[in-house]
Image (spheres, coloured by chain):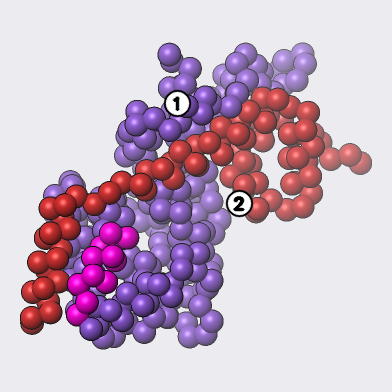
Amino acid sequence: MLSPRSCGVGMNVPGPEPPATQPPADDLALLDGLRRGDEVAFDQLVSRYHVTLVRLARLYVADRPVAEDVAQETWLGMLQSLPRFEGRSSLKTWLFRILANRAKTRAMREGRSIPFSALWSPEDDPGEPAVEPERFLPPDAPRYPGHWGMRPPEPLPEERLVSRETRALIDATIATLPPAQREVITLRDIEGWTSDEVCNALAVSETNQRVLLHRARSKVRRALEQYAAAR
Amino acid sequence: MEPEELSCRELVELVTDYLEGALPPEDRSRFEAHLDGCDGCQGYLEQMRQTIRATGMLSEEAIAPEARAALLALFRAWKRA
C-alpha cells in the first residue's frame, strides 16, 4: 500500500538508508529502552511523536477523538511489532506506516474513501493559479503584460506571523485543502519531513509531490496575505 | 537568441520548484535575473518563505496530560502481557 514508487530509496530495499534529518541514534536508544520495559523511554517517545501521530491521523479520520484512538492503536501496534523492527527505516516513518494502515482501516469502516496523494494526478486536477490573475497586468497591456499591477506583494509583518491567530488561520486554511495537498503540506511544512521521506511515505512521485506542495503553500500564503491586509 | 524574460505571473508558479532546487540551471538563471529587478517578486518570494516558517510553528503543540496518562497505562498493560 505504501510501496515506494519513483523517488527516494525504497523502504524494503536493503542497502544504505537515506540520511535522516532527525537524530535517529537517539530514537534507536529509546527503542532499546522499550525492549527493556523502560517507562521513561516510552514517555520520551510519546512526547516526541504523539502530537504528530494525532495530527496525521486527522488527515484520514472524521474527528479528533477518533484520531486520538488511532494514535493510541498505533502505539500499541508499534509495541507489538517491536521485536520485528530492524531499524531499517527511521522510527517516524515506521510509526507513520502503522498509523496510515490503522487510519485507513478505520476510515473504511466509517465508509469514507481515502483520497491518497498516490492516486492523485495533475491530469485529473489542473488546479488554479497560485495568485489571482487580476493581480497581474493583462496580456494586452501596453507595458509589462503579466507583471504585477496594483498592490505588488510585500513581506508580511513579522509580529503578526508569530501570533496565535496566525497559527489558527494556517490550521484552518490547511483543513480546507484537498486531501492530497493536505497530506503533503502537513508532512513537509508542519512536520518538517524531507521530500524523499514524503515521497516514500505517501508513494507519490517527486514531481507530483512538488505540485501538491506548491498548490498548498500558495493557498496558505494567499490566506496570510489577505489577513495581513485586513487590519 | 536571448531567452525570453519571465513575467511575474510565470514566476509565481515556479517559486516552489525554485525553493526545492528543482529548476534546471537555465530556468534558475532566468528566475534569478527576473528577481533581481523586481520588488514585487522579491516580496512574493519572501512571503512564501514566511509562509513556510509560520506553518512550521504548528508543530509546537504539546501533548495533553490525559493522553499521556492513557498511553502510560497502555504501556504498563503491554509490559504485563
Q: Residue at x 32, y 74 (%)?
A: A30
In the image, residue A111 lies in the stretch drawn in magenta: no
Is A215 displayed left or right of A75 in the figure? right
Label at residue A83 = none
Look at the image and give the colour of chain B: red
Tint of chain A: purple
Most common SS among magenta residues: helix
- Please, is residue B29 above or below residue A86 in the view? above
Amino acid on which the number 1 mark rests in the picture: Arg
Closer to the camera, A33 or B59?
Answer: A33
Residue stretch in magenta: A37-49
The residue most toward the front is: A40
Q: Position of residue A218 (x, y in %)?
A: 50, 36
Disc number placed over residue B20 in the picture, else none = 2
- In the picture, which quadrant includes the C terminus of chain A? top left
- Give the residue at the far right of this rendering: B1
Q: Which quadrant of the figure contains the N terminus of chain A? A: bottom left
Mark closer to the observer (1, 2)? 1
Q: Secondary structure at mark 2?
A: loop
Identify the residue position indicated by label 1 in the image: A160
Using the image, name the chain to which the residue with label 1 belongs.
A
Viewer-side residue, A138 vs A191: A191
Q: Chain of mark 2?
A: B
